[in-house]
Every structure is written in structure tokens, then in C-alpha cells.
Amino acid sequence: MKPWLWLVLVVLFSACRYTFLPLDPGRATLPERLSLSGTLEVTEHGALARLVVRRIAEPVYLELRWYKGDQLFQERSLWVEKPGVYQAHFERLDEGYYRLVVLARQSPLLQLEVGSPLLPPPPAPPPG
């Protein structure tokens, strides 16, 4: 067989196989984010918020805003340095609707509610 024919066959067959090793990009790392959950327990004259911080990248203040209806009623801040359970107590005036909004760096993370919200009445059915 002629040498130029071998060269053509090698070029043709090399196109059917990997002629290099694919690059391994490795595993992508995701940024560490604040992971948080919580519960709100009704007490005799208030509510107890229990916040469970599972993961935290850096220390941060958690802003806790306690609303009665649509009005800001109380505000607290918690300094969180490491994962753990954190608590805060809030007052309640009556059995109305209250909600707790948890923020970190002005970004809302969690909302917990007690009571039933005052919703507008449903629209009237169309006539006829």
C-alpha cells in the first residue's frame, strides 16, 4: 500500500474518535447563602419567634419587623454570627392579624403570620 493512502486513512479514521482528552471544568461552587427557617408560637400576651439558621456565609444582622395588619408595630434586630436557634418575643394587643417579616441586608427572607388577614369582600356576581 502506498504511504499517501495510509496518511488519508489515518486522517479519516481519526475524525471518528476523540483525538484529545475533553477538558474537565471541575465542580462549580455555589455562593454560600443564608439558610433560615422559623416558627411563630402564640403566647399569652404576645408571640415567640424561633428562627433556625442552618447556614451562614458571614455574620449579619437579621431585621425582624412585626406588623399589626399593615402597620409596623415593633422592630428588633438579631446579630447572627453562626448557625443556631435564635428567639425574639413580640407583643400582641388582641387576636387580630399579625405578621413577622425577617430581612437581611434589606432583602426579605421569611414571613410568618398569626391570625387571619382582613380581606376585602368578594366581588358581587354579575347581574343576570
Image (cartoon, rainbow, N blue to C red):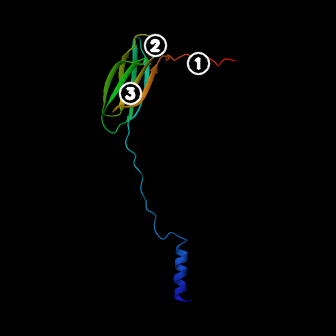
Position of 25 with respect to 128 (left or right) is: left
User: What residue appears at the point 45 percent right and 21 percent down from the top-left corner?
Assistant: 113
User: What residue appears at the point 43 percent right and 26 percent down from the top-left corner?
Assistant: 111
| Residue denoted by label 2 | 96
Q: Which corner quadrant of the image does residue 32 belong to?
A: top left
Place of residue 42 in the rendered image (x, y in percent of width and height, measured from the top left): 43, 16
Instruction: Give how far apart the Cα atoms at labels 1 and 2 are.
Output: 24 Å
Screen quadrant of the C terminus:
top right
Dot 2: within a 10 Å radius of its alpha carbon, few (fewer than 14), some, or many (20 or more) residues?
few
| Residue denoted by label 3 | 102
Instruction: Give the answer, above or below, for where 45 lies relative to 104.
Output: above
Place of residue 14 in the rendered image (x, y in percent of width and height, measured from the top left): 52, 74
User: What residue appears at the point 38 percent right and 44 percent down from the top-left corner?
Assistant: 31
Place of residue 48 in the rendered image (x, y in percent of width and height, measured from the top left): 39, 19
Q: Which corner quadrant of the image does residue 105 belong to?
A: top left
Please tell me which residue lies in front, 112 or 44: 112
Place of residue 72 in the rendered image (x, y in percent of width and height, measured from the top left): 37, 19
| Residue denoted by label 1 | 123
Callout 2 secondary element: loop
